[in-house]
Amino acid sequence: MLVSLVKATAWRKRKKNFVRQSLLVLLTTAVGTAAGAY
């Protein structure tokens, strides 16, 4: 049970990092597109 708890915590942390990276990529892409539009 403890192992599954650790796995779930690690997965949640990885998911949070993945979401943060995705937002960062989207933000960078949006800024790049806006800069290219000007």
Image: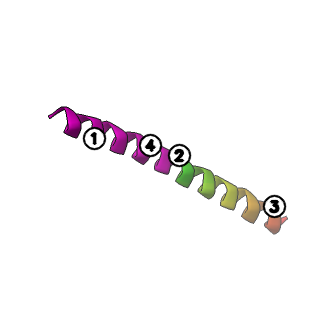
Residue 7, image quadrant? top left
Of the numbered discs 4 and 3, the one sitting upstream in the chain is 4
| Mark 4 to mark 1 CA distance (whole Å) | 12 Å
Q: Nearer the viewer, residue 13 or 23?
A: 13
**Residue 16 - label:** 4
User: Which numbered disc, 3 or 1, marks the residue closer to the eye?
Assistant: 1
| Mark 2 to mark 1 CA distance (whole Å) | 18 Å
Q: What amino acid is found at the position of numbered circle 4 in the picture?
A: Lys
Q: Main secondary structure of the magenta part?
A: helix
CB of mark 3 within 8 Å of CB of mark 1? no
Q: Nearer the viewer, residue 23 or 5?
A: 5
Q: Is residue 14 left or right of residue 32?
A: left
Image position, residue 6 (x, y; %): 28, 35
**Residue 19 - label:** none
Image position, residue 25 (x, y; %): 61, 56
| Mark 2 to mark 3 CA distance (whole Å) | 22 Å
Q: Kindly identify which residue carries mark 2.
A: 20
User: Which numbered disc, 2 or 1, marks the residue closer to the eye?
Assistant: 1
Secondary structure under tag 4 reads helix
Q: Is residue 13 left or right of residue 21?
A: left
User: Which numbered disc, 4 or 3, marks the residue closer to the eye?
Assistant: 4
Q: What amino acid is found at the position of numbered circle 1 in the picture?
A: Ala
| Mark 4 to mark 3 CA distance (whole Å) | 28 Å
User: Which numbered disc, 2 or 3, marks the residue closer to the eye?
Assistant: 2
CB of mark 2 within 8 Å of CB of mark 4? yes
